[in-house]
Image (spheres, rainbow, N blue to C red):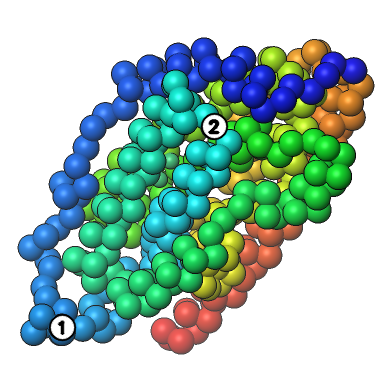
């Protein structure tokens, strides 16, 4: 079996890919200003400055849009946790360091734009939002949290959890947030919010491409090792909202109304990335990699079944609710 590469070897071997992709990113990314996406004339002071505090009737967002906006913003707010993971696993020198800085600055722009929009338009309760942010950021985030057993096992085997796991995680996470922001924009029923969230979603796509290319280069360099990391992440993936107040309730609302559900997770996030890496077509895996690939295939098959079951349940629930509304109306 091919020897696993150490973190230092991976960083060194993948550095040219990182450099090429930082350059590609800088050429492709478009600069934009968060203040251009906020309807400032809709704003008014809160009570501390002589105005009135938020009341639920101030918001023009429905429950689904509110839940999605809060979840997406808290995820952006939690940037220091993600920065920590990336900065710990990447080097702060060379192209790696440049990327960490640039990516962090771009992500911060997302939180700024969404927060300004929500506070100015009174889309959600700003006090509840601030309290949730405090809890969520204090909890922090560890992408291997969901795979804690697997992380323990690796440590016991003397294996390192590092670069490959974090780039695999952020590849899927960037794409997941892209899908979630895009659908949240539509759910807000406000062209200004929609434009802002489409703008942010476009950034997330470029971030995804960066990480996907690094992870893809890792797959070419050390196929079994990289596929193991990818499989650990895919089979334990949790949306970043875990650890957020109301995460379960918000997650259910978002899944129920097509902001982010299992089918989208499988078909718009997991599968396109695995196809790009040609995970099921390539023939450079060793025996260990082949075994991992079988494990991944079995997981995806089950995920497909779970998605179908969820969709059937959702269709029935939505039909029941529609019938109830009709009955009330007549
Ligand atoms: Fe973001
Ligand atoms: Fe991003």
Residue depicted at 36% across the width and 72% down the height: 130
User: Residue 246: image x %, image y %?
Assistant: 53, 73
Q: Which residue position holds label 2?
A: 90
Q: Position of residue 325 (x, y in %)?
A: 47, 80
Residue 239 located left or right of residue 28: right
Say if mark 2 contacts mark 1, CB within 8 Å.
Answer: no
User: Which numbered dot is residue 144?
Assistant: none
Mark in front: 2 vs 1? 2
Callout 1 crowding tier (Cα within 10 Å): few <14, some 14–19, many ≥20: few
Query: Is residue 68 among what the camera can see?
Result: no
Q: Is 328 rendered above or below residue 190?
A: below
Relative to 205, say whether 55 is above or below: below
x, y (%) of residue 38? 18, 55
Q: Quadrant of the C terminus?
A: bottom left
Mark 2 and mark 1 lie on one chain; the one further toward the N terminus is: 1
* Element at label 1: helix
Frontmost residue, 75 versus 161: 161
Residue 298 found in image quarter: top right
- The yes-or-no answer for disc 1 within 8 Å of ligand 1 is no
> Is disc 2 placed on a helix, strand or loop?
loop
Q: Residue at x 76, y 15 (%)?
A: 282
Indicate the quadrant of ligand 2 in the picture. Answer: top left
Q: Which residue is mark 1?
A: 48
Q: Does residue 212 lie above or below 267 as drawn?
A: above
Give the residue drawn at x 19%, y 66%.
Answer: 120
- Rendered-image quadrant of the N terminus: top right
- Residue at 40%, 75% in the rendered image: 131
CA gap, disc 2 to disc 1? 44 Å
């Amino acid at each position: 079996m091919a020897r696993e590469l150490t973190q230092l070897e991976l960083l060194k071997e993948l550095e040219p890919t990182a450099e090429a992709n930082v350059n590609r990113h800088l050429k492709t990314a478009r600069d934009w200003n968060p203040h251009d996406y906020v309807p400032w004339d809709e704003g008014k002071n809160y009570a501390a400055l002589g105005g009135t505090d938020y009341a639920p009737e101030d918001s023009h967002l429905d429950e689904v849009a509110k839940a999605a906006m809060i979840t997406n913003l808290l995820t952006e707010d939690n940037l220091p946790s993600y920065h920590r993971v990336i900065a710990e696993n990447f080097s702060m020198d060379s192209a790696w360091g440049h990327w960490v800085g640039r990516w962090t600055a771009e992500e911060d722009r997302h939180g700024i734009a969404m927060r300004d929009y929500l506070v100015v338009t009174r889309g959600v309760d700003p006090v509840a939002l601030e309290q949730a942010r405090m809890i969520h950021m204090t909890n922090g985030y560890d992408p291997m949290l969901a795979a804690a057993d697997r992380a323990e096992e690796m440590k016991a085997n003397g294996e390192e959890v590092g670069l490959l796991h974090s780039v695999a995680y952020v590849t899927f996470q960037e794409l997941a947030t892209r899908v979630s922001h895009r659908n949240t924009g539509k759910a807000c029923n406000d062209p200004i919010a929609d434009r802002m969230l489409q703008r942010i979603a476009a950034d997330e796509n470029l971030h995804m491409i960066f990480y996907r290319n690094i992870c893809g280069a890792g797959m070419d360099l050390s196929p079994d090792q990289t596929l193991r990391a990818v499989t650990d992440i895919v089979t334990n993936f949790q949306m970043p909202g875990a650890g957020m107040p109301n995460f379960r309730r918000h997650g259910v609302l978002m899944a129920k109304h097509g902001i982010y559900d299992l089918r989208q997770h499988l078909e718009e996030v997991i599968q396109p990335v695995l196809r790009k890496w040609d995970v099921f077509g390539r023939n450079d895996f060793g025996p260990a990699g082949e075994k991992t690939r079988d494990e991944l295939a079995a997981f995806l098959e089950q995920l497909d079944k779970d998605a179908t079951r969820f969709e059937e349940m959702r269709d029935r629930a939505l039909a029941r609710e529609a019938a109830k509304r009709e009955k009330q109306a007549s």
